[in-house]
Amino acid sequence: MPIRPLAALTAAATLTTTALAGPLTPPPGPPASTNKTLQQIEPRIPLASTGSIQIITEPGSYYLTEDVSTVIRGIEIRSGQVTLDLNGFTISGDGVGSTGDIGILITSSTGNEPVVIRNGFITGFLGDGIATSATLMQLRIDDVHVSNCDFGFDISGAASITNCTSTGNANDGFRITGTAALENCFARSNTQDGFDITDGTLRGCNAFDNGVNGFLLGDNTFNATVTATDCIAQESGADGFATQGPVALHACTASDNVSAGFDVDFPSVLVGCLAFSNDNTGFAVGAGSAIHACTATENDGVGISSGGGASVTDCVSRNNAGVGFTLGPGATAIGCSATNNTNGFVLSSDCKVSFCNADGNGDIGFQGSSDTTIDSCTSTDHSTGFIAGTGGLIIRCTAAGNGTDYNTSNAAFGPIVTLGVGGGPIVTSNPFSNIEY
């Protein structure tokens, strides 16, 4: 292969380098700045303490630069499309004046446009911590903590509230008259209710040591329904959960409340809930309600009490100072267990109880009433196992260890088959026979 001279290679490299190089002459005029403006870097509007009301009238993103102290009102939002970041700072009132002195007020001027408030503290207003003066449709509040005001949060309209607390207020912790979605919120030591919610959903919320009810839920116009999941009410001055309309409660807990754990007056659904150590009834559910897989234990009154036509299934009532289950007229109970209560099951007229168990309740296992049906149930270790009401029916049941196993006066009943000491085969051809041993 021919060898190129070194000089030729050097010349070729020089020509290539020259061809790739740009012009060395600078553009005319002084060099222009390439820095971004402050508005480009931080496109938000700062708010500092002025000692008087700060009014937001234009859309935009606002943030606090320091704690805000005021003797009247903190911030008033009169525009939609506003985001207010408290930036970890506190808006403080002086605790005197009037109930019109509010930490943050959102007015009707916002219309249906969104307003977002987040990340800070509000305290010491004679009025509310956060309030609306009209029904809003798109309000979101996140990580805001209100204390020592009138109402903590007093909101009308559609609101999404997450990770907020309301503590030590003179009225309710959270009062929402509209469609609310609350998640991971906490109401503590408020003078009235922890949560007063007319419509919407709650998830993972906690009410502790509030003066009246932990949760007051629903709307008695039947135009709204509240659904609560994984919520807890403790040490309320009245009920843990009280209702003003239909509700659906899932996996909620009520404990150590002065009155009932759950006082559900309207047709509702309760699933997987727990009531323990309340000073009165564990569960009191209204006519037409359904209660499933719930447990009442260590309450000072009735474990589970239902209104007429209610359905009670797979529930447990144990160690309550009152009756395990009291059922209203026409109610049904299936697969339930009553243990160590005053009485096991006390039935109103036309009730039907099946596949239920009563054990060790002090006086009566099953107390029937007129036209009640007790089917396929077991009663052990009572003064009286079964008492059939006038016109009632007892079939396919089992009784043992009771002072009297069956009291069937004025009732229909399957033949009672008595097993001798030591057991032995059951000899009966009647499929409706009752057993005692």
Image (tube, rainbow, N blue to C red):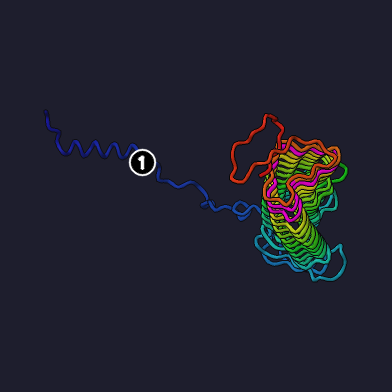
Front one among 437 and 203 = 437
Q: Position of residue 429 (x, y in %)?
A: 67, 29
Q: Is residue 213 visible?
A: no
Q: Residue at x 84, y 46 (%)?
A: 219
In the image, taking residue 54 as reference, residue 31 lies left or right, namely: left
Front one among 251 and 23 = 251
Residue 381 on the magenta span: yes
Q: Residue at x 25, y 38 (%)?
A: 13
Q: Amino acid at mark 1?
A: Ala
In the image, taking residue 339 as reference, residue 158 lies left or right, namely: right
For mark 1, does the 10 Å Cα neighbourhood hold few (<14), some (14 to 19), or many (20 or more) residues? Answer: few
Instruction: Check disc 1 and report the residue beneath it.
Output: 21
Quadrant placement of the C terminus:
top right
Q: Is residue 99 above or below residue 393?
A: below
Residue 428 on the magenta span: no
Quadrant placement of the N terminus:
top left
SS state under label 1: loop
Q: Residue at x 59, y 53 (%)?
A: 41
Image quadrant in which you'd find residue 137: top right
Front one among 135 and 185 = 185
Q: Is residue 93 visible?
A: yes
Image quadrant in which you'd find residue 56: bottom right
Q: Position of residue 394 (x, y in %)?
A: 76, 38
Q: Position of residue 169 (x, y in %)?
A: 78, 64
Front one among 435 and 100 = 435
Number of marks in picture: 1
Magenta segment, which residues? 360-385
Q: Position of residue 7 (x, y in %)?
A: 17, 39
